[in-house]
Each structure stands twice: as structure tokens, then as C-alpha cells.
Image (spheres, grey):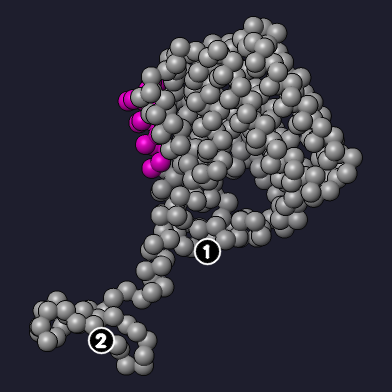
Amino acid sequence: MTGQRKEIAPGGHGLTMESATNTGNLVAAPPLATRRRLAALPRDYLALTKPRIVGLLLVTTVATMFVADPSGPSLATILWTMLGGYLAAGGAGAINHYLERDRDALMDRTCSRPLVERRIEPLRGLIFGIVLGSLSTLVFALAVNLLAAALALAGLLGYVFIYTLWLKPLTPQNIVIGGAAGAVPPLVGWAAATGGLALDALYPFAIVFLWTPPHFWALALLVKDDYARAGIPMLPVARGEATTCRQILAYSAVLVAFTVLPFLTGLFGAVYLAAAGVLGAGFVGLAAHLDLRRSRAAAVRLHLASLAYLALLFVAMAVDRLV
């Protein structure tokens, strides 16, 4: 028989063989497990970038662009900013996966991450993160502006060095101080839209900064045992659940009170105020319920609601400015 042929290897393993010519030289196809692993590799690299977290950060970035420039930034500027923002946040996430792989191996929530299970070699994960961060700086510098590039890079470095390496293993206030890195995307959006920063840019920055502790501590309550095994002094581990719930309620109240300030200064109007009032009442209500009940279900509700709260509040900011 000439051309290609398929044979079943002895033992019935179903190994496919092909002959490039009629000389009978056979080349074994990769085993099924190898093919599946290669097919899953893009998904594993994507997981290193923490896409669900990045998606929320991009909402705050793009919404702030319309707050800064109600006439509307150009579509090209928006798209380049989204790309640069994803690369910066994704690069920070990948580097975080590398730095925390040993602690991740001790926690049920993270023990199946790509670097922990070595579906991706750790050094390759680190290089991937550095490449993404470098590309982000180039995208912002060449397609947006240098200020946006500098702010995005500062956010990445702050998350990696100040939060991950320094504060996280050191103090239960890690997320309070280190949360500033996660609040940088609105500043990037403002700089991308206007080429500079104004005092009003501090409002969206501060809202994300104040939102971060109650959002994250609600999650920390759910995985307290994980953090204890890994030796990470998150607030529920270091101070207990009762203190954590009280701190969540306190920060939620301060956050909601602060969201009224941009209306009082004239940055936003009635549309934003109505949204801030309704969303804030729901957020504080869930935080109060958690403090009273201190149940897993209450912590889950608050954590999930906090994601919707921030996204909807920033959408309300943009809509208010546009109308």
C-alpha cells in the first residue's frame, strides 16, 4: 500500500502511525495525554493572568475615562488602554502566581493552579508575567501616553513588591495598604483620556481603595483555614472572625459615606447620587447582616455583591457624566 496508512500497535493501545512515504518509516503520533496537555496550555497561561479580576479592573478603568472626558475618548484610545491594562494586570497576576506557588500548594483554593501542578514550569510563568508587564509599558507609551504607562507600571510593581512580597506575609493590614495597587487602574484611565491627572481623579481611586478591604475580607472569611495553613496573617486568622466582621462593616460604612462626596463637590449629579445611595444601602445592609449572623452564606453574599457593587457604581459614574 502506498501513501499513508494507519496501524494498531501490538497490545491494542490504539497508537496511530503514519508513513510519510512507502519506505515503511513510521512516526508515532503524540500520546493522547500529551495532546490534551498541549491543548490545555493556552487556558493555563490565561489562568495566570487572573482574567476575572482583570475584567473588573478594566470596568473601573474605562468608566473613569468617560468621567475624565465626558465627550468620549476615541475608540482607539479606549481599546489600546484596555489592552495595556489587561497586559499590566495580567502580568502582575502571573508574577504573583510564581511568587506564591509554594503557599498556593498549601491551600485548597489554589493548590490546582498551573504553576503549583507544574502544568507550566514556574520559570516560564515568571517570564510570561515579565513579558506581559513589559508589553503593557510599551503599549501605553507608544499608543496612549507616558503618564498612563508610568502609572500602569507603578501599579504592577506595587502589587508585586509592596503587597505580595512585603505586606502580605507581614501584617493583617496587608490588603488595606496594598490595596492601593489595585486602585491604580482608575488613575490610568484618567491619564489615558486626558494626558494628565486632576484632583477629581482621586475620587475613583479612593473608592476602589476603600472598597478593597471589605471585598477581600469577605473572601478571607471563607478561606480562613487555607490562610492559616499557609501562614498568611489575613485578618480573620490574626484577629478572628468577630473583629473581621466589625472591620468589614466599618469600612463599608466609610466607603458608602465617601461615595457621596463627589456629588457634593459637583463632579457627579443626580444619576450618580441615586445609584450610590441604592447600591450603598444594599452594601452596608449585607455587611451589617454578616456582622450579626457571621455565617458562611452571609460572607458569600457580601463577597459576590461587592463585585456587582463596584462595577455598577463605576458604570453609574460614566452614565452620569455622559448625560
Q: Outermost residue, top direction? A: 266
Residue 7, label in figure: 2
Q: Amino acid at mark 2?
A: Glu
Point 49% across, 13% down: residue? 70
Residue 274, label in figure: none
- Does 141 appear in magenta? yes
Q: Is residue 97 left or right of residue 139?
A: right
Residue 88 lies, in percent from the top left, at 46, 36
Point 60% across, 60% down: residue? 111
Q: Amino acid at mark 1?
A: Glu
- Does 65 appear in magenta? no
Residue 307 lies, in percent from the top left, at 65, 37
Residue 201 lies, in percent from the top left, at 57, 16
Q: Is residue 95 visible?
A: no
**Mark 1 residue element:** loop
Q: Please tell me in which quadrant of the rendered image residue 161 appears.
A: top right
- 216 or 149: which is nearer to us? 216
**Mark 2 residue element:** loop
Q: Please tell me in which quadrant of the rendered image residue 134 appears.
A: top left
Q: Quadrant of the N terminus?
A: bottom left
**Label 2 environment density (alpha carbons within 10 Å; few <14, some 14–19, many ≥20):** few
What kind of secondary structure does the magenta stretch mostly adopt?
Answer: helix
- Observer-side mark, 2 or 1, equals 2
Which residue position holds label 1? 117
Q: Outermost residue, bottom direction? A: 11
Q: Which residues are magenta?
A: 131-147
Point 44% across, 16% down: residue? 72
Q: Is residue 195 visible?
A: yes
Residue 173 lies, in percent from the top left, at 73, 36
